[in-house]
C-alpha cells in the first residue's frame, strides 16, 4: 500500500513488470520525437521566431515608427485618422503598441517578406494577428524583429491579448494584405 | 508530550496537534474555494457573450480575485493539510513544532486576506501574474509575500516531522510512496517560494517607490519560476492523492516502488526552470535556450507524468484483479465503485488531467506551437484541465474520505456526493474543452469584450467562436454549481454531521500496524495490467494525433523567420 512503507525493505532491486518496462520505453521514444520536432522545424519549417531583438528606448522606437509612417503613408483609417502605411517589400516595418492602440495600420503585399519590428511604449501588450492566430509577447524597451511573409490576402486584425488595463478590450489594430 | 487519539476507521494514531492544524487548513481552503469559485462564476457569466454580466472594471477585478483565491489560496491551504497528514499521520509520529504550524496558518491567512482586500479595493486589478510595469497597491504584493512565507514555514514543519519520524524510528525502511510524493511537492515548493521571493520582494519595494524600474523580461522569467513551478507542486500533491486513494479504497500497492519514485524524482530534477514554457514568444531569448529548457532534451518531466498515468490506474487494476475481477480486459473497471465519490473523483481526475491538461500542456510548451496558442483562451482551457479537473477534483475526492474520518462524522448529503464529482468534473471539463476551442479560433484570454463594441477598429470573430464562448460559459456555471455542492456537503458535514462513534484519546501512539484490509504483494508477484496498458495506448494515440494536427495547423499560417 502506498500509504505504508514499502513491504520489502530493499524495494529498489525488485524487478519491474514487463508491460511497465514496455510503457517506459514507448513513452521515452515519444518524448524524444517531441524534442526533435522543435529543431527539425527550425531547419525544415517556415514558422519560426527569429532570435533577433534589441534593447531600445520607447521614444527612439516611436521616432522610427513615425518616420516610416510619414514616408510611406497612403491613407487614413478610423475616426482618429490612423495612417495607413505601405512600406516597400523587404524593408524594415514598424508597429508599436500603446494604451490602447496598435499604430500605424500596415499595408503589405502578399508573398513578400518584411522585417517587422514590434515594441511597446508603456505596458506589456500581446500582438495577436487574427484570423491567422499568430501570437507574440510585446515588451516595452525591447525591439522584437522577425521576418514575416504574408501567405494570404485580405484584412487582418491585431488584437491585444496581454491584459493592459481598463481599455485592453478596445485595443485593435489592422494589417491589410493586398495581392500584387 | 504530544497527545494522540486512535482513529476508529483506520487505526491511525493521530497527533491531536496535527489533527487540529489539518482541520483548520482544510476548512480555510474550502472557504477560499467558495470565494474564488463565486468570482469564477461571475467571470464565466461575463465571458458568456449572451449574458455579459459584469462591467469591464469589475470583470478584471473578479478575474484577478478568481485566480488568486482558487489557484493560490485554496490549493496551497489544502496542500498544507496534506503535508501534515502525509508526515505526522502516515508516519505515526508527532508533528514537529506545532507552534510553527500555527505561524504558517496565521501568515497564510493574513496574507490571503490582505491581498484580497487590495484586490477588492479596486486598485490592484493586475491579474494573478501582476506583470510589471502595471502596478498594484503595495499591500497586494505584501499579502502574497506573507502567504508565501507562511507556506515555507509549513514546508519546514513537514521536513522536521520527517526528521523526527526517522530519528524515533516510527516506521521501518523507506517512507511510504504517498509521503514521498508529498516530499517531492514540498521540495519543489521551497524552490518555488524562493523564486517568488527573488521577484516579488523587489516588486513590492518598486510599488513603494524605492526601486525605479523592473525589467519586464526579467520579471516574466523569474515570476514564472514561481508561477509554473507552483503548478508542479500541485501535480506532485495531486498524484500523491491518487496513490493514497488507490491504497485507501483498494489496498492497492504501486506496481513498482522504483518506477513510481523515480517518476516523482523527475519532477524535482527537470522542472525547476519551467518558466521557459511561458516565454516562448518573448523577445531576447534564444531558440536554443527555449528548446532546451522546455524539454531538457527529452521531456523527462512529461515522461514522469506518463509513468504515473500508467502506474496509478495499473495499481488499481492489479488490486481489483487480486480481488477476483479478472474477466476480460475491463471487468475490474466495470465493477469499480463508480457511486463512491472518492473513487469517482479520483478516476475522473486521472482521466481528465491526462487528456485535457496533460496533452495540451505539451502543445503549449513546444516552442513553435506556442505561437498559435500563446495568450489565447486556449491557455485557461489548458490549466482548467490541470488544476481544476485534475488537482481540485483529486483534492475533493481526498476530502470525501478525509473529512468524515478526521471529524468522525457522517456525510450529510451522501446522495449529492454521489453525483457531485460527475457534475463538477464534466462541467469544468467541458468548459476547458470549449475554452480551448475558442482559443484555437483566436479568442484572447483576459478580455472583457470580444465584440469590440467600444473599440475604434473592430475585429469580427467567427460565429463558431461565439458559440464556443457561450458553451464555455454554460459549462463553467454547471461546473461551478458542482463545486458549490461539494462545499455545501463539506461545510454541512463539519457543522451538522451525525457523529460516528467518538474516538478514545490515547497518551502514546499505539505501536501496532494498521490497515488489515491491505493486500500485500511484492512487485515480483504483481499481476499484469493489460486493461491499463490498453487505456495507456489509447491515450498515447490521442496524444500523437493531436500533436501532429497542431503542427499541420501551424504550417498553414504566415511564414516567419
Image (spheres, grey):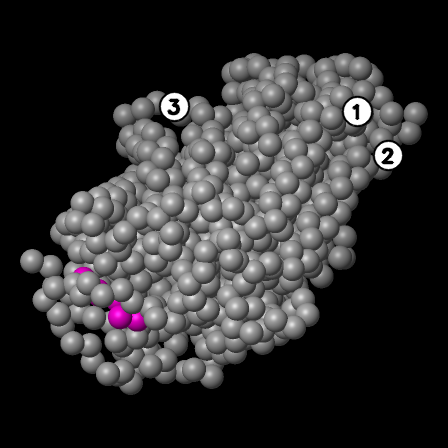
Marks 2 and 1 sit apart, C-alpha to C-alpha, by 24 Å
Residue B513 occupies quadrant: bottom left
Q: Name the residue under label 2.
A: A153
Residues flagged by tags 2 and 3 on a common chain: no
Q: In front: mark 2 or mark 1? A: 1
Marks 2 and 3 sit apart, C-alpha to C-alpha, by 41 Å
Is residue A140 in view?
yes
Q: Quick check: B430 left or right of B344?
A: right
Point out residue A1 in the picture as x, y percentages from the top left corner. 40, 60
> Magenta segment: does it hold B14?
yes
Helix, strand or loop for disc 1: helix
> Magenta segment: does it hold B561?
no
Q: Give the range drawn in magenta.
A: B10-15
Nearer the observer, B96 or B219: B96
Point out residue B40 in the picture as x, y percentages from the top left corner. 48, 60
Residue at image coords 84%, 37%: A154
Q: Quick check: B54 left or right of A89?
A: left
Chain for numbered disc 3 = B
Q: Mark 1 points at which residue?
A: A44
Helix, strand or loop for disc 2: loop
Q: Name the residue under label 3.
A: B213
The disc at residue B544 is: none
Residue at image coords 64%, 45%: A22
Marks 3 and 1 sit apart, C-alpha to C-alpha, by 41 Å
Residue at image coords 65%, 73%: B327
Is residue A99 in view?
no
Chain for numbered disc 2 = A
Chain for numbered disc 1 = A
Q: Which of marks 2 and 1 is nearer the N terminus?
A: 1
Amino acid at each position: 500500500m502506498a500509504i505504508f512503507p514499502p513491504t520489502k525493505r530493499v524495494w529498489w532491486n525488485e524487478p519491474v513488470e514487463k508491460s511497465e518496462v514496455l510503457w517506459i520505453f514507448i513513452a521515452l521514444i515519444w518524448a524524444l520525437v517531441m524534442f526533435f520536432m522543435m529543431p527539425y522545424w527550425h531547419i525544415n519549417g517556415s514558422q519560426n521566431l527569429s532570435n533577433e531583438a534589441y534593447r531600445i528606448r520607447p521614444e527612439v522606437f516611436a521616432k522610427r515608427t513615425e518616420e516610416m509612417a510619414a514616408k510611406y503613408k497612403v491613407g487614413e483609417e478610423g475616426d482618429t485618422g490612423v495612417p495607413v502605411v505601405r512600406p516597400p517589400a523587404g524593408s524594415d516595418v514598424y508597429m508599436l503598441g500603446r494604451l490602447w492602440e496598435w499604430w500605424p495600420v500596415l499595408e503589405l503585399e502578399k508573398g513578400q517578406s518584411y522585417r517587422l519590428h514590434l515594441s511597446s511604449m508603456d505596458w506589456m501588450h500581446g500582438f495577436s494577428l487574427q484570423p491567422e492566430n499568430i501570437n507574440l509577447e510585446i515588451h516595452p524597451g525591447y525591439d522584437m524583429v522577425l521576418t514575416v511573409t504574408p501567405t494570404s490576402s485580405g484584412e487582418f486584425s491585431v488584437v491585444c491579448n496581454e491584459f493592459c488595463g481598463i481599455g485592453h478590450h478596445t485595443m485593435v489594430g489592422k494589417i491589410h494584405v493586398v495581392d500584387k | 508530550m504530544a497527545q494522540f487519539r486512535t482513529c476508529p476507521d483506520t487505526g491511525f494514531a493521530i497527533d491531536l496537534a496535527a489533527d487540529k492544524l489539518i482541520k483548520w487548513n482544510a476548512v480555510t481552503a474550502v472557504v477560499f474555494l467558495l470565494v474564488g469559485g463565486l468570482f469564477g462564476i461571475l467571470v464565466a457569466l461575463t465571458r458568456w457573450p449572451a449574458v455579459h454580466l459584469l462591467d469591464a472594471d469589475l470583470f478584471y477585478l473578479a478575474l484577478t480575485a478568481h485566480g488568486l483565491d482558487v489557484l493560490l489560496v485554496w490549493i496551497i491551504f489544502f496542500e498544507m493539510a496534506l503535508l501534515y497528514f502525509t508526515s505526522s499521520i502516515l508516519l505515526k509520529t508527532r508533528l514537529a513544532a506545532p507552534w510553527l504550524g500555527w505561524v504558517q496558518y496565521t501568515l497564510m491567512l493574513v496574507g490571503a486576506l490582505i491581498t484580497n482586500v487590495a484586490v477588492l479595493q479596486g486598485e490592484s486589478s493586475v491579474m494573478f501574474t501582476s506583470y510589471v510595469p502595471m502596478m498594484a497597491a503595495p499591500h497586494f504584493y505584501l499579502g502574497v509575500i506573507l502567504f508565501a512565507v507562511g507556506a515555507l514555514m509549513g514546508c519546514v514543519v513537514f521536513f522536521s516531522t520527517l526528521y523526527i519520524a526517522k530519528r524515533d524510528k516510527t516506521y521501518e525502511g523507506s517512507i511510504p510512496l504517498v509521503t514521498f510524493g508529498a516530499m517531492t511537492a514540498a521540495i519543489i515548493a521551497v524552490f518555488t517560494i524562493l523564486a517568488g521571493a527573488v521577484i516579488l520582494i523587489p516588486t513590492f519595494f518598486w510599488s513603494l517607490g524605492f526601486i525605479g524600474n523592473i525589467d519586464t523580461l526579467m520579471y516574466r522569467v523569474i515570476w514564472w519560476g514561481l508561477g509554473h513551478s507552483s503548478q508542479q507542486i500541485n501535480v506532485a500533491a495531486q498524484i500523491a492523492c491518487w496513490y493514497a486513494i488507490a491504497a485507501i479504497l483498494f489496498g492497492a500497492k504501486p506496481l513498482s516502488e522504483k518506477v513510481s519514485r523515480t517518476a516523482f524524482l523527475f519532477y524535482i530534477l527537470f522542472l525547476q526552470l519551467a518558466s521557459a514554457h511561458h516565454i516562448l514568444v518573448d523577445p531576447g531569448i534564444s531558440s536554443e535556450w527555449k528548446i532546451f529548457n522546455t524539454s531538457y532534451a527529452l521531456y523527462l518531466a512529461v515522461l514522469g507524468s506518463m509513468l504515473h498515468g500508467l502506474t496509478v490506474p495499473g495499481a488499481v487494476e492489479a488490486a481489483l484483479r487480486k480481488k477476483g475481477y479478472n474477466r476480460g480486459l475491463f471487468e475490474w473497471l466495470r465493477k469499480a465503485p463508480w457511486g463512491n465519490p472518492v473513487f469517482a473523483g479520483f478516476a475522473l481526475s486521472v482521466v481528465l488531467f491526462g487528456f485535457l491538461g496533460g496533452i495540451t500542456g505539451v502543445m503549449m510548451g513546444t516552442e513553435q506551437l506556442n505561437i498559435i496558442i500563446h495568450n489565447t483562451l486556449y491557455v485557461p482551457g489548458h490549466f482548467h484541465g490541470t488544476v481544476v479537473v485534475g488537482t481540485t477534483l483529486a483534492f475533493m475526492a481526498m476530502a470525501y474520505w478525509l473529512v468524515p474520518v478526521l471529524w468522525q462524522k457522517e456525510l450529510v448529503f451522501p446522495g449529492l456526493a454521489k453525483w457531485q464529482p460527475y457534475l463538477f468534473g464534466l462541467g469544468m471539463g467541458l468548459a476547458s474543452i470549449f475554452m480551448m476551442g475558442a482559443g484555437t479560433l483566436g479568442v484572447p484570454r483576459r478580455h472583457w469584450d470580444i465584440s469590440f463594441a467600444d473599440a475604434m477598429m473592430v475585429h469580427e470573430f467567427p460565429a463558431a467562436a461565439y458559440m464556443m464562448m457561450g458553451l464555455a460559459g454554460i459549462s463553467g456555471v454547471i461546473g461551478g454549481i458542482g463545486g458549490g455542492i461539494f462545499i455545501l456537503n463539506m461545510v454541512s458535514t463539519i457543522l451538522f454531521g451525525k457523529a460516528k462513534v467518538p474516538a478514545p484519546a490515547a497518551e502514546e501512539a499505539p505501536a501496532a500496524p494498521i490497515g488489515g484490509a491491505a493486500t500485500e504483494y511484492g512487485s515480483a508477484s504483481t499481476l499484469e495490467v493489460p486493461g491499463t496498458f490498453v487505456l495507456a495506448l489509447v491515450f498515447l494515440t490521442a496524444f500523437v494525433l493531436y500533436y501532429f494536427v497542431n503542427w499541420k495547423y501551424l504550417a498553414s499560417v504566415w511564414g516567419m523567420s
